[in-house]
Each structure stands twice: as structure tokens, then as C-alpha cells.
Amino acid sequence: MSVTLVPSLPSLPTVPSAPSAPLDVLGVPGEINLDYAASAPCARAAADAVAELLPWYASVHRGAGALSRRCTLAYEQARQTIGDFFGARADDHVIFTRNTTDALNLLARAVPAGTTVVTNASEHHANLLPWPRGSVRLPVPSDPDGAVRDLAAALTELRRGSSPALPVLVAVTGASNVTGERWPVAELARVAHRHGARIVLDAAQLAPHAPVDLLALDVDYLAVSGHKLYAPFGAGVLIGRADWLDAAPPYLAGGGATSHVGPATHDVTWATGPARHEGGTPNLLGAVALAAVCKALDEADQGTLAAHEQALLTRLRTGLAALPHVVELRTFGPDAPRVGIVSFVVAGWDSTEVATRLAAEHHIGVRDGLFCAHPLARRLLGEAAARTGRRDLPPTALRASIGLGSTAAQVDRLLAALAELG
């Protein structure tokens, strides 16, 4: 009987446990969840906040009863908590949405006519597909400095070739959902503003791993998903400057989005502020859950949390590099800053088959496919084949992602399972 040796791994630094129980995450004993980048597990803080409010659950806004008044207060307090957590400016709107995709689609509906949106081929589909025709898609850069140079060149050319009065919006990610690599958001924001453009940050993958401060980064808009941020109750947010949002038609026409409706068909005065784009009964529980996680993270030692994750990430990447049949995907260099997301392929193995075997034989959940970032994932798969000279790499990839509650033992179980495929 042959014995598969698991590669020697560096010992993890001693990292104290999270300082408070609210950031414990729920899970199923025996099941190893390494698919946080798709949907993170529920934090205890989110579950407790929802459980506490459920007996009081009632309508939000316009209700005179005690239950409705409490729910309205909880909803608006959640808006304030989330805005404060992400560094919203005093005059910014904090609009509740379903998720990051919904938030970016809302903004796409609100950009003024004639706006040119500049994005990058490395983006998630949520930051590629909603933008109007005529948008500019930049090629995938080889390093963060290249991303800044490419944007500066594109904006210079745009301003030369069009009226300086026409608005421009730059749409960037904070961290890649394919590779986990962090993007130079503050530098990109400086370039955008130097050319009179606005910038929106897709923080879906960055916010669960690192502090995101809209004011410090100097971005104009920010989009986030609750289900990535340990609050899986169907809420997200769009935070940002009010003028475009107040001038745009409501994202959802309906109750709550109006200040006056007259007898004629189109005799409508739309509300200003977040209500303009929150028509219908809002997702109270999602808002409260997301605010509870934001509060718990704000009160936690985020430096300790980040150090723990980075130690696990180093362990995972070092272990994958030691397996000769595993190739990691990357856009930038191997030492570029990144969050707890790693995509890779197993030579000679179909990625879906590997994911299925990991689940069935080892109770390990990872993601397989192209991760709703098809242009980037296909490019990186081709780059991996060219870099290694291998012709037996599959056409799709695997992704392991970690966060709160992830452990060294879970990482080692994945590495051992992958070693068996060699």
C-alpha cells in the first residue's frame, strides 16, 4: 500500500482567539467550509440580532404601533451603524440593496446620461455587465502599478477625446474574487479624481477581510454584500454621493419611494434620500444582521483577526506550492498583497470532479468553475499553462477561501486530500 506524504508546512504563529463570541460563526460539525468567497457562514452576532428582533417583527416606517416603531428604529439605526462602519460622509446616502450586484446595478441606473464607465477585464461580472454601452474595459494589468498607469492613460485619452463636462465613473474591485489579490484602491481614486472622474469600489471581497473606509480611500461610492460579510439574510448596501442618486429615477417604483402621488397616472413626486431607491417593504432582518456584524467587527481586534487569516493563507499557499501537480492562479506576482482566497488547478484532473471528490470523500467544500469572472479566469488559466509548460491543465479552476472560524486543521485536511490526487 503506497503512502502519500503531505508536504512539510511552516508552523503557524500563535494567534489568540477572537476576543468576543459575537464573531464566532455557525457551521455543521464534520463539514469543512472553504467557500467563504461565495457565501460566508453566519456570524453569531447576526443570528443573535435576528433572533432578538423576530418577536417584534412588523412593518418599517409609517406604522404607529409599538412593534412597527421599534422595527423602524432598528432599521434606521442599522443604516447609521453600517454607514459609520464604512466611513460614510455626512451627506452620503446609505441605500439598502440585496447584494453587491444589486447595488452596482442601482448605480448603473443612476449615472447621468452620457457617462463613460471605465472598468477592468479582471472584474467580477457584477462590475462588468451592468454598465451602459460605450463603457471602457481596460486589459488585465500585470501588477498594481500597471493598473494605476493604465487608468491614468485611459482617462487622459478620454478627456482629450470628449467634452470635459461629460461624467466619467471608474469601477474597481478592492480584492479579486478569483485570486484574492488586493487592488491599489487609494491610488486609483487619486488618478480618477485628478481627471475629474468619480470612482465606485466593489468591496464584496475586501470588506470581509480588511477594514474598508470610504473616506480614507476617497472613493465616491461603495458596494457591499451582507452574505459575504457573515450576515446571510439578503441585504447589501450602496453608499455614496447623493446628487446622482437623487436625480435618478427610482430603482424600484412603489410604496415608500414617493412623497406624493396624485390622481393622474404620472402625477408622482419621488422622495429624495435612500427611500427613493428602497421601494416596497424593506429587508429589516437583513439590515439588522449586517449592522450587527459591522458592530462586532468594529469592536474586535481586527489586527489579530487579520494576522490569523494571513498565517492560514501562507500555510495554504505554501502547501499548494509544494504539490507538483497543483498550480496556483495569479494576476500579479506571487508576493502581492491578498486576502484569504486562492484559486488553483490540479493537473490532469477535471476541476468539477476534484470538487465533487473533496465533498464526498473528505467533507470539504470548495468552489469550482470560472467564479463569475469568466474573462479573468480564462486568461489566468492560459497564463498558468504558459508559465508551467503543462498541457494537462483543466479549462476551469478550483477556489479555496477562508475567514472567521477557519483553522489550520482545515487547511491541512485540504492539502492532504489534494496530495492524494497526485
Image (tube, rainbow, N blue to C red):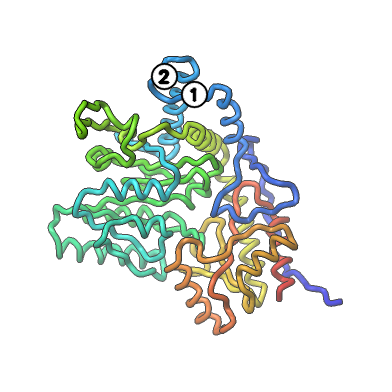
Name the secondary structure under disc 1.
loop
Location of mark 2 (residue)? 63
**Residue 58 badge:** 1
Count of marks, rendered view: 2
In terms of depth relative to the viewer, which is nearer, 237 or 175? 237
Quadrant of image for the C terminus: bottom right
Q: Percent from the top left, x then y, of residue 292?
A: 53, 33
277 vs 14: above or below? above
Q: Which residue appears at 45% of the width and 63% of the height?
A: 373
In terms of depth relative to the viewer, which is nearer, 139 or 95? 95
229 vs 365: above or below? above
Residue 153 relative to residue 63: left or right: left
Quadrant of image for the N terminus: bottom right
The image quarter containing residue 192 is bottom left
**Residue 390 badge:** none
Q: Percent from the top left, x then y, of residue 183?
A: 42, 58
Neighbor class of circle 1 (other Cα within 10 Å; few <14, some 14-19, many 20+) is: some
Q: Percent from the top left, x then y, of residue 8?
A: 73, 68
In terms of depth relative to the viewer, which is nearer, 93 or 375? 375
Instruction: Kindly check if marks 2 and 1 are in contact, taking CB atoms under 8 A apart as contact.
Output: yes
117 vs 275: above or below? below
Q: Which residue appears at 59% of the width and 72% of the height?
A: 345
